[in-house]
Image: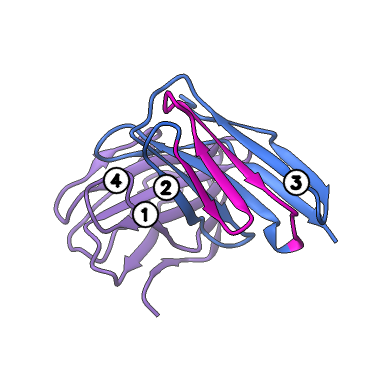
Chain colours: A blue, B purple
Amino acid sequence: TQLLKQSPQFLSIQEGENLTVYCNSSSVFSSLQWYRQEPGEGPVLLVTVVTGGEVKKLKRLTFQFGDARKDSSLHITAAQPGDTGLYLCAGATGANNLFFGTGTRLTVIP
Amino acid sequence: IAGITQAPTSQILAAGRRMTLRCTQDMRHNAMYWYRQDLGLGLRLIHYSNTAGTTGKGEVPDGYSVSRANTDDFPLTLASAVPSQTSVYFCASRRGAIAGDEQFFGPGTRLTVL
């Protein structure tokens, strides 16, 4: 059962452009995380959002948790080649497990 | 450097063979996890362990088994590998019991079953 769907699945943009990645579900999550994964490596945590409507900023990255805690978005301003990677959202529904989204593969072209 | 190590890095395996993927962490984290990553499906949880001596089933446990004899090690065994188990396998750990805490991932094992 895939609880979290991300869109788009693939995204290729020019350096300096803005972009938004979406993470959607019909389930309510107690918290939601965003990870970034580079080729040949494991995912690395970027941010955790907990409260419905919460917005967190990490330099050029802005993360938002939906009011109903069912969805989230990641907005990147003025993308740079170093932003290239696989972005994964992950929702927590209970004490143990994270459910990961399907992933968005971002390529930023210099 | 503290973290998670996985072995082997990659493996090609004949169908029907037994295989154990190794995972060791030196952060003294209580919880450990095994995921498989397949294109278009993201990361799916296979098995987890909240603390040494306990294990639980995740989303896709069939064909896999785990053990947690101590805090540091969490091996994943495929008793009789099948081609559908071709995937990249990631081990992860988490310090506490709250699902929203950060999970730390190993570098992965790329497994091909022929």
Residue A73 lies in the magenta-colored region? yes
Which residue, as the protein is rendered here, is positioned at the far bottom? B1
Distance from Cα at disc 4 to Cα at disc 1: 15 Å
**Mark 2 touching mark 1, by CB under 8 A?**
yes
**Chain bearing mark 4:** B
Asked which quadrant contains residue B12, the reply is bottom right
> Is disc 2 placed on a helix, strand or loop?
strand
Position of residue B66 relative to residue B6, above or below, is above
Q: Nearer the viewer, mark 4 or mark 1?
A: 1
Q: Which residue is mark 4?
A: B48
Position of residue B37 relative to residue A81, above or below, is above
Q: Which residue is mark 3?
A: A18
Q: Position of residue B62 (x, y in %)?
A: 37, 34
Q: Nearer the viewer, mark 2 or mark 1?
A: 2
Distance from Cα at disc 1 to Cα at disc 3: 27 Å
Q: Which residues are magenta?
A: A54-81
Mark number displayed over residue B102: 1
Q: Which residue is mark 2?
A: A48
> Is disc 4 placed on a helix, strand or loop?
strand
Distance from Cα at disc 2 to Cα at disc 3: 22 Å
Q: Are both tags, 3 and 4, on one chain?
A: no
Badge 4: how crowded within 10 Å, few (<14), some, or many (20+)? many
Q: Nearer the viewer, mark 2 or mark 4?
A: 2
**Mark 2 touching mark 4, by CB under 8 A?**
no
Residue A10 lies in the magenta-colored region? no
In the figure, is residue B77 to the left or right of A1?
A: left
Q: Are both tags, 1 and 3, on one chain?
A: no
